[in-house]
Amino acid sequence: MNTLLRFVQYLAKRVIILAIIISLAVLAAFIAYDCANIYIVITEGMTLRATAILEGQENIVLNKFFTQSYLNADPLMNNNVYEDFIIQDYNIKMRVKWLWAWPWEDKVKVVIEESIPKIVGKPKDDEQAAKTPPAWQNGEKIVLLEKIDSYWKIAGVIFKSYLD
């Protein structure tokens, strides 16, 4: 009887350890899945936003990456300071500094560094020959995301600080 009790305890310990390991692996997979999705939404969405602003295009694809309420309230999309220019060249640089999402969360904050160091463009009117395009707001930003219908979308961008 004593041997049987020890054998059952041995099996119970092994089953519990195995269940914990499997649970941690499943949790890690869900975290990785959400973080990968958020990373893609941020990098693709912010790049498309900058392209739409600089090139002055009404981009329908932005709805895949941004909530409609943010697109309606985005100051750069609504009051485009680049609309008087023909932008010829620019290079978007973005780096995700902090990203974490628990599987049960519906709202996430991500810290990024976004910059467009040089914008080359010319005025649309020949009368403004000496005018150059304004600089982009290069800096560290907090991107707010919401999970809507199982998809992550950018719901806000908060400027935190300028890059050094």
Image (cartoon, rainbow, N blue to C red):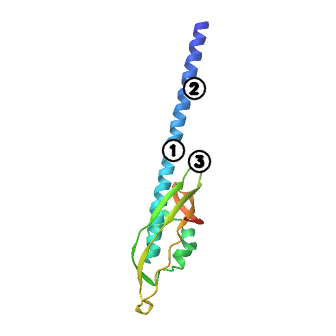
Q: CA distance from mark 2 to mark 1?
A: 21 Å
Q: Amino acid at mark 2?
A: Ile
Sequence-earlier tag: 2 or 1:
2
Q: Which of 101/50 is in front?
A: 50
Q: What residue would you read off at disc 2? A: 16
Disc 3 secondary structure class: loop
Q: Is residue 80 above or below residue 140?
A: below
How far across and how far down the image is residue 27, in percent? 54, 40
Q: Is residue 122 left or right of residue 15?
A: left
Amino acid type shown at disc 3? Trp
- Between 94 and 147, the one lying in front of the other is 94
Instruction: Tell me what residue is drawn at x 47 percent, y 64 percent.
Output: 45
For the view shown, which residue lies furthest in the top direction?
1
Instruction: Measuring from the top left, give residue 12's x and y in whole percent.
Output: 58, 21
Q: Which mark is residue 104?
A: 3
Q: Which residue is painted at 47% across and 74% down in the image? A: 53
Q: Which mark is residue 30?
A: 1
Kind of element beneath mark 1: helix
Mark 3 → mark 1, Cα distance in angstroms:
10 Å
The answer to whether residue 57 of the structure is visible from this angle is no
